Amino acid sequence: MTEPAKRGPGRPRDEQNTERRRRELIAAAYRVFTTKGYATASTADITAEMGIGYGTFYRYFDSKRAILDEVVDYGLDRLLTEIAGDVFEPALLDREFTVEELIQTWSGAVERMCHIAESDPALMNAMLFELPGIDDELNTRILGLGGILAATVDRFLSRAVDSGVIRDDVDTGEVSWMLLALTIPPVMRTLQGRGGSDRRAYIDAAIAVLTPGLRALQPETD
């Protein structure tokens, strides 16, 4: 009797091949959706991008809408990884620092968002303009992400209040949403083709307002 063929020691397991193919499909769908737009793209475009048949696609995803959720996660992971950096690194609040450094942390995040808008405008256009509004489920996910980011910024600002860096009479929750909102205009202007000098002027104007507004109040002296 012939013995069953044994798997070689260096051969990837079936599970690894399955996960690799799944990731390849998501990456291909990302390229198609950000190039052609979700509304006009089809599963045929995705399979053509990879050079595979329909059957392979449908072994992993039921429909174009089913893979969209994975594509959104893929895009958001790219954005957050490149933008956040060490923005919320706790070590920042473990030493003496100034409100100017906190504002610089925000402006650094804005710069990174704008650099992504310059290098990968299709990603930013998709996340800001096309994907919101596709359906209520996706809107809820995107709004939920905004809430998570705002809550993270809120915790960061609250620690700054406790350290005496930021004035204690401001609502850090509302300021968190304001800071998130302030990141959008320079990104939109970058997508319109405006350069670094325009971005710097916007950031300087925002800093001129934010710095005195957040700085801890000094005790009055006689």
Image (tube, grey):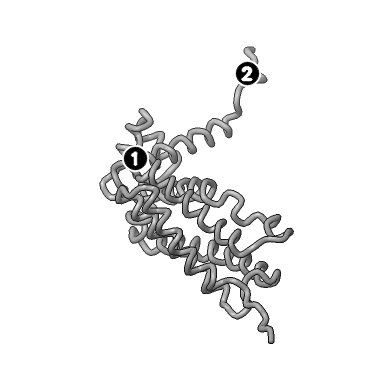
User: Residue at left 51%, top 53%?
Assistant: 109
From the viewer's perspective, is residue 173 above or below residue 110? Answer: below
The reply, left or right, for residue 61 in relation to residue 44 is right
User: Does residue 212 sit above or below 1 in this rendering?
Assistant: below
Q: Position of residue 179 (x, y in %)?
A: 49, 65
In the image, 93 versus 156, the foreground residue is 93
Residue under the point 55% across and 52% down: 84
| Mark 2 neighbour density, 10 Å: few (under 14) some (14–19) many (20 or more) | few
Q: What residue does disc 1 label? A: 32
Q: Nearer the viewer, mark 2 or mark 1?
A: 1
150 vs 139, left or right, is right
Q: Residue at the far bottom: name it.
A: 222
Which quadrant of the structure image shows residue 98? bottom right
| Placement of the C terminus among the 4 image quadrants | bottom right
Residue that appears at 65% across and 77% down: 218
Residue 112 in picture, x, y percent from top left: 48, 48
> Residue 120, located in which quarter of the rendered image?
top left
Could you tell me which quadrant the N terminus lies in?
A: top right
- Where is residue 116 drawn, in percent x and y? 43, 45
Distance from disc 2 to disc 1, alpha carbons, whole Å, reads 42 Å
For this view, does 101 lie left or right of residue 113?
A: right
Q: Amino acid at mark 2?
A: Pro
Kind of residue indicated by mark 1? Val
Q: Disc 2 marks which residue?
A: 4
